[in-house]
Amino acid sequence: MSKSHNTQSCGSFDHEIGRRAFLGGLTACGVAGLSGVNPVHALSEPEFTKVLKAKDRRVILLWLAGGASQFETFDPKPGRPTGGPFGEIPTNITGVKISELMPKMAKRMDTTCLIRSLSTGNADHVSGSQLMMRGRRDEPNLAYPDFGAMVARELAQKESQVPDYVSLFSATEGRRFSRLSQGFLPGRYAPMRLEESMKPPNLEKLDKISQGDHERRSQLQSLLNQRFLSSRKTSVAESHAAAFARVNGLMSSQKLFDISDEPQYIKDMYGPTLFGQQALMARRMVEAGVPFVRVARAWWDSHAQNFETHLELVPELDRVMSALLDDLKARGMLDNTLVITLGEFGRTPRINPGMGRDHFARAWSASLSGAGVVGGSVYGETDENGEHVKKNPVNAGQFVATVLEAAGIDSSKEYHVGARPVPLVDPGIEPVRDVLS
């Protein structure tokens, strides 16, 4: 990774975050224009305020593992041969209709932008999942980070005691398909995988160790690290010390992983399902400062009995998604939290002999709600049977770039792997500006 030439900085890839954010804000305001200007007044400049606000953004991804049907969610085609048995209902946005299985979200479309024109051509679970999470394919000698890791890298606070990136995926189906990875980024930005429980394993101290002994051990460890670093200041030693500090921070944040103290009416709002509980956990995490949380709901891979599957899963998604948006809004967090629904692909227009829909990556839907997007909008359009994108196709790279921009991250930014500059998205890829606020 590249290092700063500023002599006041240690040059670490991570230690520059706060400094770059501040200088980036000054650049946005126009450094030349600050001559003779009261610096306090400069902090009130709209562009600088926008930069500071963007750094406080968070992202929650509701991952629809296996590929949800766009026909039974956000792009219904009732009355068409491809439409299936479910109808459509109007939303609180004039002219916009979604599946009748989503009555709660129909009342909340003013906070949401629908993208109805995703098109990648990759209908394989593994490579399709990786493509949607990374926006591009790995090179033989270079593994790219997924957008969760990029969000974590850009939005994490250096001294944060909470995780930077959390993935909740309790089902076994599809768990490894997207192969979440920090790629070439430092290990700190790898996801914390909560798969067997909503609480990280080995988080609590052993019963045989008293709280006093635990605290004294932590203090001793910190003292020894400081002494060691005073004469051997290397990136490896610093990383080792930081890892211990973050573990201690996580141990002191145990209540973050326990929703039992949430008011009953909040738990009732999300519902009794594991998906609902994990979405509530995601809200707790972003509220505590976790930059990126992925909550996976499996299994949408409805090759047979598509309509029964979606009759079960879509109302749950409707309840959980609407509860999450309401909860964030009530807490004043929706303006700086981006909520995404996304799968690796959609389902075929053709209904197969097993009354199922197969993999389909030529024209399907995703949603973006909250921070950074134009609510109450629809981008892209499919034809009358949902077989092709009719207007404004969006590929995986464009989608990732749009997510980054909505999270307040410049998608044209470059990292460095050795001397090689590596952009966050492939050269020439632009975000969908029409959906960004």
Image (cartoon, grey):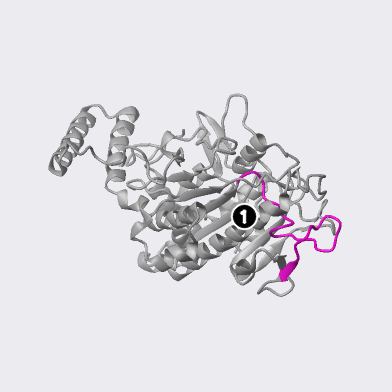
Residue 285 drawn above or below residue 169: below
**Residue 31 screen position, x and y as percent:** 46, 57
Left or right: 176 as drawn, with respect to 121: left
Residue at mark 1: 313
**Residue 321 screen position, x and y as percent:** 55, 61
State whether the magenta stretch is mostly helix, strand or loop: loop
Left or right: 137 as drawn, with respect to 207: right
Residue 138 drawn above or below residue 25: above
Magenta-colored span: 65-89
Say which quadrant the C terminus sits in: bottom right
Mark 1 neighbour class, 10 Å CA radius: few under 14, some 14 to 19, many 20 or more: some
Q: Is residue 381 visible?
A: yes
Q: Is residue 47 visible?
A: no
Residue 299 drawn above or below residue 38: above
Q: Secondary structure at mark 1?
A: helix
Taking the view exactly as shown, the residue that stands out farthest to the top is 141
Left or right: 381 as drawn, with respect to 190: right
Q: Which one is in front, 107 or 357?
A: 357
Whether 400 is among the magenta residues is no
Q: Residue at the location (61% across, 47% down)? A: 400
Whether 77 is among the magenta residues is yes
Left or right: 150 as drawn, with respect to 94: left
Q: Which one is in front, 135 or 194?
A: 194
Q: Residue at the location (49% across, 52% down)? A: 274
Q: Residue at the location (54% across, 57% down)? A: 339
**Residue 78 screen position, x and y as percent:** 80, 63
User: Please, what is the three-letter code of the amino acid marked with disc 1?
Assistant: Leu
Q: Residue at the location (31% across, 31% down)? A: 240
**Residue 278 screen position, x and y as percent:** 47, 52
Q: Which one is in front, 216 or 406?
A: 216
